Amino acid sequence: MRFKPELIKGMAKTAHPYGCRKEVLNQIEYCKKAKQFNGPKKALIIGASSGFGLATRISLAFGGAKADTIGVSFETGFTDRRTGTAGWYNNIFFKEFAEKEGLIAKNFIGDAFSYEVKANVIDYIKKEFGKIDLLIYSLAAPRRKDPKTGKIYDSTLKTTSEAFSGPTIDIEKDELITTKINLATEEEIEATKKVMGGEDWKDWCELLLQNDCLSDKAITIAYSYIGSPRTYKIYKEGTIGGAKRHLENSALEIDKEWKNKINGKAFVSVNKALVTKASAFIPSFSLYAAILYKVMKEKGLHENCIMQTQRMFNEKVYSINPAEFDEAGRLRMDDWELREDIQSEVNDLWEKITPDNFKTLSDYEGYKEEFMQLNGFEINGVNYEEDIDIEILKNLEP
């Protein structure tokens, strides 16, 4: 069977198994060559199969700390109807490479919101893995079933101030289109907080604490994004922005409890605008990111997920010098993105963009390449004409 990319708007319907393997290996090689850091020996990553979550796991294992890791993600393997998600193959091949280095790489596939998955992870930590030094919360999900009530909440990408229309890149058709986003209802705002806010992060933190699964001075970090004024209407001032503020408030509560109980620390890391499976769905974000890529690459400041994660651990979280936080207690990994000179050039280009010139005035080619690479395509060294034995794929287990 030959694997070819199939795109529908901001979503890839297929992934290339061995392209995913090569991309995991590329990230590993980057970390091995980068400046190393001394960090945690036992880490739990919630949302570990792609984007920042996967990059975090790779950086912790191969960027200096040589950490044993547990990854939790909701992915699907090869079936009669599907060829397997990119995250499924990322989990498998990360485990392969980590175990070759003598590291533990345990994968839990399931709903991270559920009591069942939490119980299984805690049981494994207590019986086999050992206490956690670092908990990363990098979960991006479209819906959540509240384990307490059984009610299902759906997250929405809507505004909370007024309806909004903005330019968005349609990756499937390579076109710049106008997307309209409606005003959210109070119910939609609250539902998005339930899915993408800090409630589930707090649940994980409390359960780990109650079950004595945390080491002294353990750290927990949740990933977030704020962005520039260009994306405020749909992001900072939208339903997703409200959820992220809930996440930040949760960080303060967790930090207080962890500090009292284990001398630990909790905070949010505000990351740079990057192509991830979650960000590809955000209207106007794609154009902003493509322009930002162009400007930051020209200045030698562009980072992808693995580069930013390695810098975060090496220069901030596990640096010899104490990490600096903003007035709200957040770690700012978007510091380069929001530099005045960067944003000034982004704004100048934005005003000149049209459906006819967006490919040349932005780094659309680089943006799309990164999106394709998330799914194992357009990666050097991969034979995309290879006929892959699907029986081998069916037998792969994370």
Image (cartoon, rainbow, N blue to C red):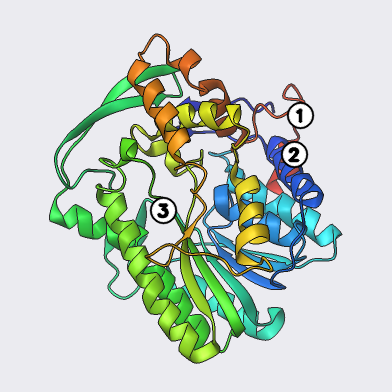
Q: Earlier in the sequence, mark 2 or mark 1?
A: 2
Q: Are marks 3 and 2 in contact (CB under 8 Å)?
A: no
Q: Quadrant of residue 357?
A: top left
Q: Determine whether the residue tagged by mark 3 lies in a helix, strand or loop.
A: loop
Left or right: where 210 falls relative to 109? left
Question: What residue lies at 14% left-to-right and 50% top-to-bottom?
Answer: 185
- Residue 320 lies left or right of residue 143; in this view the side is right
Alpha-carbon span between mark 3 and mark 2: 26 Å
Which residue position is annotated with label 1?
382
Cα distance between the residues tagged 2 and 1? 7 Å
Residue type, mark 3 in image:
Ala
The dot on residue 22 is: 2
Query: Pointer 1: residues within 10 angstroms few (<14), some, or many (20+)?
Result: some
Query: In this orientation, which residue lies closer to the viewer: 346 or 50?
Result: 346
Image point 49% across, 45% down: which residue? 272
Instruction: Give whichever of discs 1 and 3 has the lower sequence position.
Output: 3
Q: Nearer the viewer, residue 212 or 134?
A: 134
Is 28 above or below relative to 13?
A: below
What amino acid is at disc 2? Lys
Query: Which corner quadrant of the image does residue 286 belong to?
Result: top left
Quarter of the image for residue 83 reads top right
Mark 3 sits on what residue? 141
Quadrant in which the N terminus is drawn = top right
Residue 79 visible to the viewer = no
* 78 vs 95, nearest the viewer: 95
x, y percent for residue 186: 14, 56
The answer to whether residue 12 is left or right of residue 241 is right
Mark 1 belongs to which amino acid? Answer: Val
Task: Report how far apart the C-alphas of labels 1 and 3 lie in the structure.
Answer: 30 Å
